[in-house]
Image (tube, coloured by chain):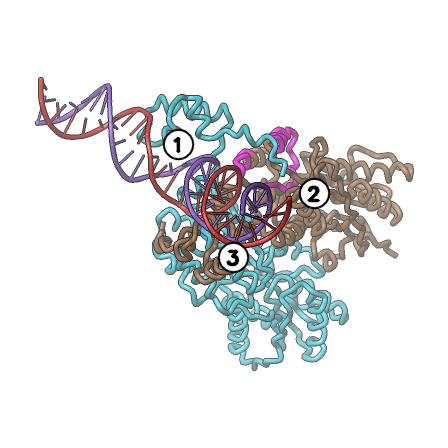
Chain colours: A cyan, B brown, C purple, D red
Amino acid sequence: MTEGTKSNKVNMKTLAKVLNVSIATISKALRDSHDIGDETKQRVIETARLLHYVPNPYASSLRKRSSNTIAIVIPEIADSFFSQAINGIESIVDQEKFHALIYLTHDSYEREAQMFNDLTSGRVDGILMSVASNTKDTQHIQNLQKAGVPIVFFDRVCEDIPAAKIKTDDFNSAYIATSHLLNQGCKNIALVTIEGYPSILLAREEGYKKALAEQNIKHEESNIITCSNKYTQENIAVLKDHITKTKPDGIIATVEHLATATYLACEELTLNIPQDIKVVCFTNQITAAILNPPLTTILQPAYEMGRKAAELLFGHLSGRFIQMEKENIILPSKLVVRDSTRISD
Amino acid sequence: MTEGTKSNKVNMKTLAKVLNVSIATISKALRDSHDIGDETKQRVIETARLLHYVPNPYASSLRKRSSNTIAIVIPEIADSFFSQAINGIESIVDQEKFHALIYLTHDSYEREAQMFNDLTSGRVDGILMSVASNTKDTQHIQNLQKAGVPIVFFDRVCEDIPAAKIKTDDFNSAYIATSHLLNQGCKNIALVTIEGYPSILLAREEGYKKALAEQNIKHEESNIITCSNKYTQENIAVLKDHITKTKPDGIIATVEHLATATYLACEELTLNIPQDIKVVCFTNQITAAILNPPLTTILQPAYEMGRKAAELLFGHLSGRFIQMEKENIILPSKLVVRDSTRISD
DNA sequence: TTTATTTGCTTAAACGTTTACCTAAATTTA
DNA sequence: TAAATTTAGGTAAACGTTTAAGCAAATAAA
């Protein structure tokens, strides 16, 4: 609607008429082609500036069969990790003068598959993604790859797909977190994870088990608490129930949105952190330091992961990194110790 | 690069050839035109499905002169308010089968103006935006409006531009927050704001002043603390300096990212919240309830604001809401009282 | 029955770029 | 000086849709 004054749009035709040259000359001059003389180039550029010419991206994309646009496909956005990762991605997208379409799967395979179907249109030149936690069938992703759209996974990667991957050392950081709890005196550590079990959570679980095994603590399957991947009150109930039954003295929350649930569950059970129970969480929440008590976290290099993923993608788009599937980059997370795992005196 | 197997792309031409009809028939059948018989329509739809036909958005956008894409222009993304607002926007964008391009101004006027220049290309059919805090000259926005691109402001609106606006009741909620602090016994309340002074912060300041005036407390200009709009350590120093000098017994932080700085400043000065100083912050941080102490907040209806803004925009795009500039919607924020403003016994 | 209308489809132009190919003049090379 | 090459542009097709205009056959109205 309101088409209004769209008629006076200045395009290459306008410029060509004004300068009395062909449209081809305009196009070539603006792309700095060797076909065009310096003087003509200057006149074209100057006139374009004067008339506020802005190229039509859709005509350009149609003709060039490339869009200068990428897709960011992530489970959710109200999550510090993904927000920070987007910042990293955006820093490169901006630099490359590309554009970024945002797609939220809400951690649903169905939505993810549907989005990928849309993306077979050639809408984007590449994709940066973190897969939904319940994505088992990866046909939609492979189809797009076959169609020639490069995909870079970050954080929640698909291990079985040959593509560039940016991960953090999930196994190792869970191992470190668990060892830390053990060293702080915990004997009975629960691992809070979410349904759907993406591969990174499996890695975290393995790291947790390794640390237990090393200190000769038998792993009980009942110590794995499975919550919903949604931010919901129900998780608090699940946690309270589990904590009441298995009485852990340490908890590792493997995903960000379970930090609040864990704290609230402990509070409602009048358990004191860290005296009664010690807590560490995989989170990039900026408020971790001012929580009650300050939360020991596994801090992931979210910004850097986003940046690196984008760098790889653009490297590939510009001809470097021919063998994308060989790129498997692991950026280290770090344990930031705070009061929630302090030994009480 | 890697053009690869893009050759076997199926387009309308392919379908036309397979079905032995014209391209126009394909196009019209897929758009459910009355021109085409039911039987033919079914055959077209069936074949399109079978051959996995996906329309080329760029050809379509070029021809239709509309893109089914909107732009979300916001200062930053690692901010709970904007993250939640994007969720709200996305819920509508998804429903309307549109696409959303994300643009982060990093709260810089220069970047914002540059982005708007790009958007004069017709890349998007509409814009949802929160202006950068240092945007004084709004020529770039007006230019785009003149070019026929509808803009809906949310949260950080441009008061002087005739456009749809979704706000929260900044004046009133600051008034309520201030009154709350006064009722809790504060006598000397500082207002923490940021440089650049967007209009919503002015409104918050006015609400603050009104509450003071009502209780006959003289407003001191020195009680306004101006921080940077960046997330930086420096803000903590500024706060500490100010708190040391003016010794406030209450603080209102007007923007989300100052909550952490405020808490840390108090901690470093070994001031007890709420005993020595009470704190309330405009924030949607989900962790507010588990901070030390739990933070009293002005909770903004971020998701709803995003949703409403998108609804208005799509209403306009589909012909409703002809007079967008008349739309000025105010959604209420609410004061969520927690321990950071509790009267100590 | 004749005329008007509807139905179902086709033709072809248009959207605004980009680019392969052509051409004429200017310059260089032999 | 003649031939080859370079320079500086122009012509026109192509990208994949959408849609105005047209048209023949079928149906309805007179």
Residue, disc 3: B41
Q: Which portion, as a residue range, is magenta?
A: B117-146
Question: Image point 59% across, 32% down: which residue?
Answer: B147
Q: Nearer the viewer, mark 1 or mark 3?
A: 3
On screen, residue A328 versus residue A225, left or right, reads left
Residues marked 2 and 3 touching at CB (< 8 Å): no
Q: Are marks 2 and 3 on the same chain?
A: yes
- Which residue is drawn at the image coordinates 65% and 48% (left, top)? B82
Between the C-alphas of marks 2 and 1, the distance is 39 Å
Residue annotated with mark 1: A27
Horizontally, is B306 left or right of D17 in the view? right
Residue A309 visible somewhere in the drawing: no
Mark 2 or mark 1: which is in front? Answer: 2
Which numbered circle lies on residue A189? none
Badge 3 element: helix
- Viewer-nearest residue: B78 or B223: B78
Residue B306 seen from this side:
yes
